[in-house]
Image: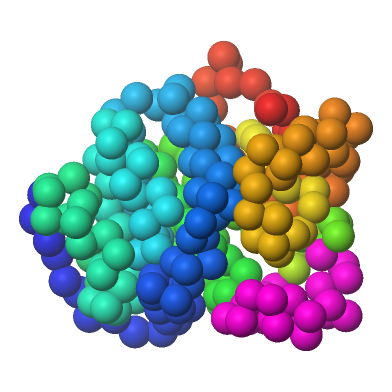
Amino acid sequence: MQDVQATSSGEHADVETSSAGYAARFAGPAGVWMLGVQERLVLRWLARRPGATVLDVGGGHGQLAGPLARAGFPVTVLGSTAACRQRVQPEVDAGRVQFVAGDLVALPFPDRAFDVAASIRLLPHCAAWPRLIAELCRVARQAVIVDYPTGQSLNFLSAALFGAKKKIEKNTRPFTLFRHGAVAAEFARHGFAAAGRRGEFFLPMVLHRVLQCPPASAALEGCCGALGLKRLLGSPVLALFERTTARHSRSQRIYGQD
């Protein structure tokens, strides 16, 4: 795939998440396990769309680009600056991923240029998040996948515990908490309806980082899932939205399902 560069302006919320420092937050066994939870759910949703072209907006962190490319999806990563390509450079060099530098909230692509648009680790750090959603919907023919932290979870304690969290994680930063209805309403404005929603974890991610023991984390989250806590209060939330004019009769809502 050819590497493309475009002039970037506007939001640069992905610069931090594309850095080596941010990647360190997911280092070690706990980080690998947490990213695996995210990866498996996204791949499950995309399994119904084999070979779909995917635009990964703000995906310079590489959390999805590599797994999606290895699963056979043509992937384009959009970063706000050329520096955001560093962590996906090996995939670009191998011809599995294309990188484009451009404005996160004024995407340099025509309408419905990709089958699926995804944006992970970006929405809570983007001040112009309604514009980001509008652009994701504009360039997606079929579906959009995003994640976001919700105040309808233990995150409602985040303001009070932010200082302690920063002492543990060192490089954590403030983020916006969303309500499910507000996110769904913004997508509905652009002709997309919620087709799947899943809280990744009930317990705070910082706890899993401290434990550094995936079997223990999986057991704890499994118990929370069995009690229905992840479905009701899980965060961050992965959400799938489908274009209402393109939904298939075989599609079914999968809210909170494992």
Residue 196 magenta-highlighted: no
Say whether residue 243 is visible: no
Residue 1 vs residue 17, the one in the foreground: 17
User: Residue sitting at 26 percent across and 68 percent down?
Assistant: 85
User: Residue sitting at 21 percent across and 52 percent down?
Assistant: 91
Q: Which residues are magenta?
A: 155-176
Residue 55 location (% of width, % of height): 35, 51
Residue 120 location (% of width, % of height): 51, 57
Residue 69 location (% of width, % of height): 28, 40
Q: Quadrant of the C terminus?
A: top right
- Please tell me in which quadrant of the rendered image residue 162 appears: bottom right
Image vertical order of residue 223 relative to residue 185, above or below:
above
User: Residue sitting at 76 percent across and 35 percent down?
Assistant: 219
Q: How is the image coloured?
A: rainbow
Report the magenta stretch's main SS: helix
Residue 99 vs residue 249, the one in the foreground: 99
- Please tell me in which quadrant of the rendered image residue 253 appears: top right
User: Residue sitting at 85 percent across and 29 percent down?
Assistant: 226
Specify whether 72 is left or right of 156. Answer: left
Residue 5 vs residue 182, the one in the foreground: 5
Image vertical order of residue 121 relative to residue 115, above or below:
below
Residue at the farthest top position:
250
Say whether residue 19 is visible: yes
- Please tell me in which quadrant of the rendered image residue 130 appears: bottom right
Residue 7 vs residue 29, the one in the foreground: 29
Residue 63 location (% of width, % of height): 42, 53
Residue 162 magenta-highlighted: yes
